[in-house]
Image (cartoon, rainbow, N blue to C red):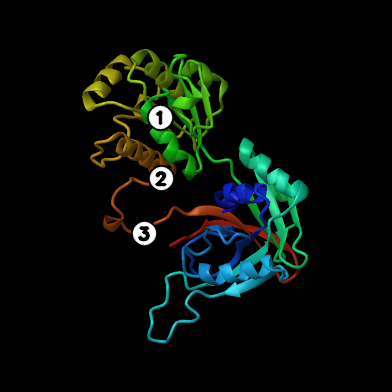
Amino acid sequence: MLAEVWPFVAQRQGAGQRVVLARLVRRAGPGSRPLGATMAVASDGAWSGSVSGGCVEGTLLDEARSVLDGARPRLVSISPGVDLMPWEPAPACAGELGVLICPVPTGPVYAAIGAALATRRPLALGVELREPFRWSTAASRDALPSGDDHFVEELDPGPVLLLVGATDLAAALATLAVPTGHRVVVVDPRPTYARRERVPAADDVICVWPDEWLAAASLGPRDAVLALTHDPRIDDRAIRAALIGSAGYIGALGSRETHARRLARLAGAPGLDRLAGPAGLDLGAASLAQTALSMLAEVVAVGNRRTGGRLCDARGAIRAAVLTTHDWTTSDGTTRGDTRPDLRL
């Protein structure tokens, strides 16, 4: 998606380089990446992102570099495996892909994308699929043109991951969670802990009691809370406040014995059955980084309504179905929105 490559785009643009985007805007058949998947190719030859997970990136690099060299922007159709010999196995993502090859937008559109991603505000981003491939932005997709000649992507600010305690584990969790699209907020009432340098990857590090922060916040079903301090005076206040809210996941660090004592202290608290403890998936984690991986994996699994078991032991789609809105045109020319799962391999 565009947000995945934007740090690369901003860095290269800031260094005075030109950048061309290759964006997946149409697909007929299966594919390994969703609509909106993007590659960014800079004038120094560096590139970031993917459109198909590896099947067509080489061809798209050539297309993007030709635009960097002065060719006109264009919408290309490409089929993975088209150059294979008849006896060679076709790749899994064998559907025809429609990829828009065009420079990074400039002016107000460029500024709006950067501001929305920096402040984690929602933004609908549209582009015409015909020359001159004009870009536009709005607060929601309903305010942008739709139909076969337009592609609209909604930049999602992502769910909040609230970490209670600016600990070394919080730092490890933040490092893993930010690339997954979470907005990581760390709260700790202890001034010697609540310092930016302790959790440099987090979006915010705030010196405040967790229940006070939660009382002022509006966490929803996509958001998660993890209590990490091992100090009941802090963790218990955070858990009580989170349980009466709407966060979709609430977990706490600790051994089974620690959690049993925690449950005894919190007996009678509304929603106590929602508390996950010890937090994390059963990875046999032995190090700080492995513990962070275990805990974040459970957050992601619960957010995707999965159990977190081994894929080789499971059945069904590997990736969660994401509801997307596809615009289509009827025979009478009426454009309608059809919301349905975007099924991925």
Residue 197 screen position, x and y as percent? 48, 26
From this view, report whether residue 142 is shown above or below residue 64. Answer: above
Q: Which residue is mark 3?
A: 316
| Quadrant of the frame with the N terminus | bottom right
Q: Which residue is mark 2?
A: 305
Instruction: Name the N-terminal-most of marks 3 and 1.
Output: 1
Residue 122 screen position, x and y as percent? 64, 41
Q: Alpha-carbon neighbours of circle 2 within 10 Å: few (<14), some, or many (≥20)?
A: few
Q: Amino acid at mark 3?
A: Gly
Which is more foreground, mark 1 or mark 2? 1
Helix, strand or loop at disc 2? loop
Helix, strand or loop at disc 1? helix
Q: Alpha-carbon neighbours of circle 3 within 10 Å: few (<14), some, or many (≥20)?
A: few
Can see residue 144?
no
The image quadrant that residue 98 belongs to is bottom right
Can see residue 55?
yes
Q: Which residue is mark 1?
A: 170
37 left or right of 146 in image: left
- Residue closer to the observer: 213 or 112: 112
The image quadrant that residue 115 belongs to is top right
Residue 235 screen position, x and y as percent? 38, 19
